[in-house]
Image (cartoon, rainbow, N blue to C red):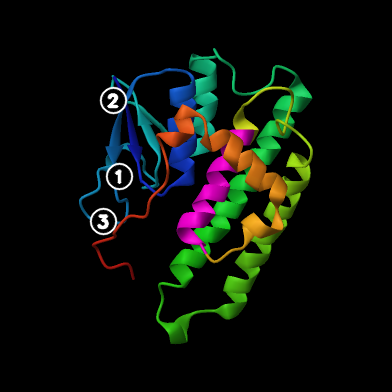
């Protein structure tokens, strides 16, 4: 059986979990804290990052965008990306923006874990601008639409939906719900799906000291 190494708050791992669930692909979920010395992540990913999808033969693929490409290639039904080339590229663009927002949140999270006198407020402000810019663009793309790309649920909704709920975990003070009603509506639609309801993100405790 497939094995997915995942972290509970990770929007990247949640994307993969949702895709596997939407395609009804059985897998074993292995929860890891990649920062802790007990993690098995380095055995499967030389970059020591999650998520990692491990196949029956022990081979693995990693980085959520690449994992989703592999899943779509191996299990094309039901499709999560449009058949039309330009719509498919548009969905990938949405994913790039959503992942970029998550990346900025991760950078702010770790910067805020530094001693107060060592934190760079300029760095934090720069990441906040990325978050706000990404949210504005995704809200624009979602405005007045049932689905962000094409006429069916797919990658764009997975990427955007996981991103906004990640904000609730790692950036709870961000007022995205009051600023972007189109994203609130999209989040409500996708969170009603069983694949989303079963993968609600929660924070993890990091036991090892991160320097």
Whether residue 145 is visible here, answered yes or no, is: yes
- Name the residue rendered at 48%, 18% in the picture: 23
* Region rendered in magenta: 157-172
Secondary structure beneath dot 3 equals loop
Considering only order in the chain, which callout, 2 or 1, is on the residue closer to the N terminus? 1
- Name the residue rendered at 60%, 53% in the picture: 101
Considering only order in the chain, which callout, 2 or 3, is on the residue closer to the N terminus? 3
Considering only order in the chain, which callout, 1 or 3, is on the residue closer to the N terminus? 3
Q: How crowded is mark 3: few (under 14 residues within 10 Å), some or many (20 or more)?
A: some
Q: Quadrant of residue 136?
A: bottom right
Q: Are marks 1 and 2 in contact (CB under 8 Å)?
A: no
The residues bearing labels 1 and 2 have C-alpha atoms spaced at a distance of 13 Å
Pick out the residue farthest to the bottom: 117
Q: Residue 58 carries which label?
A: 2
Q: Mark 1 points at which residue?
A: 42
Count of marks, rendered view: 3
Q: Which mark is residue 36?
A: 3
Say whether residue 2 is left or right of residue 142: left
Q: How crowded is mark 1: few (under 14 residues within 10 Å), some or many (20 or more)?
A: few
Q: Are marks 3 and 1 in contact (CB under 8 Å)?
A: no
Residue 47: % across, % down:
40, 47
Residue 111: % across, % down:
47, 71
The residues bearing labels 3 and 1 have C-alpha atoms spaced at a distance of 11 Å
Residue 92 in the image: above or below residue 114:
above
- Name the residue rendered at 70%, 39% in the picture: 93
Say whether residue 89 is left or right of residue 123: right
């Amino acid at each position: 059986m497939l094995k997915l190494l995942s972290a509970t708050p990770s929007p990247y791992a949640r994307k993969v979990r949702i895709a596997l669930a939407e395609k009804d692909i059985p897998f074993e979920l292995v929860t890891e804290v990649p920062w802790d010395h007990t993690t098995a992540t380095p055995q499967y990913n030389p970059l020591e990052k999650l998520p990692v999808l491990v196949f029956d033969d022990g081979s693995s693929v990693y980085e959520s965008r690449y994992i989703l490409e592999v899943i779509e290639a191996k299990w094309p039904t039901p499709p999560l990306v449009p058949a039309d080339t330009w719509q498919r590229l548009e969905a990938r663009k949405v994913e790039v923006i959503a992942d970029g927002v998550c990346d900025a949140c991760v950078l702010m999270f770790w910067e805020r874990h530094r001693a107060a006198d060592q934190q760079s407020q300029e760095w934090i402000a720069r990441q906040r601008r990325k978050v706000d810019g990404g949210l504005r663009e995704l809200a624009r793309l979602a405005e007045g639409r049932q689905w962000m790309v094409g006429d069916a649920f797919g990658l764009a909704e997975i990427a955007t939906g996981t991103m906004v709920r990640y904000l609730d975990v790692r950036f709870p003070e961000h007022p995205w719900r009051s600023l972007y009603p189109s994203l609130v509506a999209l989040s409500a639609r996708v969170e009603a799906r069983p694949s989303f309801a079963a993968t609600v993100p929660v924070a993890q405790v990091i036991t090892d000291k991160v320097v």
